[in-house]
Image (tube, helix red, strand yellow):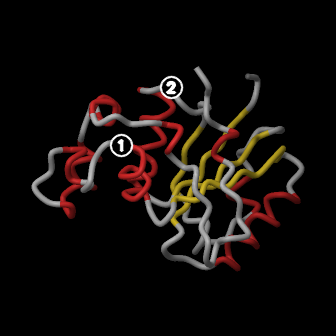
Amino acid sequence: MGKYYQYYVEGQDEEKIIQVLKTELQLIAPGKVEKFNVVSEKFTELRIMPLKMGTIVVLVFDTDAGNIDTLKENIKFLNKQRTIKKVLCITQVKNLEDELKRSCNIKEIKELTGSKSNSDFKHDMRKEKQFGNKMMKKGFDMEKFWIKTDNHIYKEILNQAAEIKLHK
């Protein structure tokens, strides 16, 4: 590809899913992953200093919380940086669990990890070594993952996940 991707994700759960999708399942463009909540924290020049020229920045965030103004400021700031080739947004409508329920053959999120309860899911997912395998066993479909755009607060932010998905 010859492109550099830098993913900024909300938390450990998104960090885990990005790692699984890019490494174990090889369904998205490879790149570095950093925890940074783009809907509540503001980018600084210091934070983006390590980025290589021509980097494509991918912002992954939930649409169930946060501040659209902070997100817009971050997008505007990143688009002004000469090292950044492009800024892509991935909206998780409403959150990661909803995205996984939409893209797997499950009714409740706990079914994905065999967790005792839905509230145990995140902990169990983070410690699971073969999470991609578990996703595939539950019929994970990348075509259904990260495809929605929020209709409310984030409606003007397009979901650009298609640009990082690898088509096999």
Q: In the figure, residue 152 lies in which quadrant?
A: bottom right
Q: How far apart, in angstroms, are the residues tagged by discs 1 and 2?
A: 17 Å
Q: In the figure, residue 163 lies in which quadrant?
A: top right
Position in image of residue 82 (x %, y %): 89, 50
SS for dot 2: loop
Front-most of residues 55 and 168: 168
Position in image of residue 47 (x %, y %): 67, 57
Q: Is residue 94 above or below residue 89?
A: below
Front-most of residues 52 and 69: 69
Residue 24 lies left or right of residue 84; in this view the side is left
* Residue type at the position of mark 2: Gln
Q: Which residue is disc 2 drawn over?
A: 26
Q: Residue at x 42, y 45 (%)?
A: 103
Q: Is residue 104 above or below residue 129?
A: below
Residue 51 lies left or right of residue 15; in this view the side is right
Which residue reaches farthest left? 116
Position in image of residue 54 (x %, y %): 83, 38
Q: Which residue is disc 1 drawn over?
A: 104
Q: Which circle marks residue 114 in the picture?
A: none
Q: Residue at x 81, y 65 (%)?
A: 77
Marks 2 and 1: in contact by CB < 8 Å?
A: no
Q: In the figure, residue 168 lies in which quadrant?
A: top right
Mark 1 residue crowding within 10 angstroms, few (<14) / some (14–19) / many (20+): many
Front-most of residues 135 and 67: 135
Q: Residue at x 44, y 36 (%)?
A: 141
Q: Earlier in the sequence, mark 1 or mark 2?
A: 2
Q: Is residue 144 above or below residue 99?
A: above
Position in image of residue 144 (x %, y %): 50, 44
Q: Is residue 142 above or below residue 60?
A: above
SS for dot 1: loop
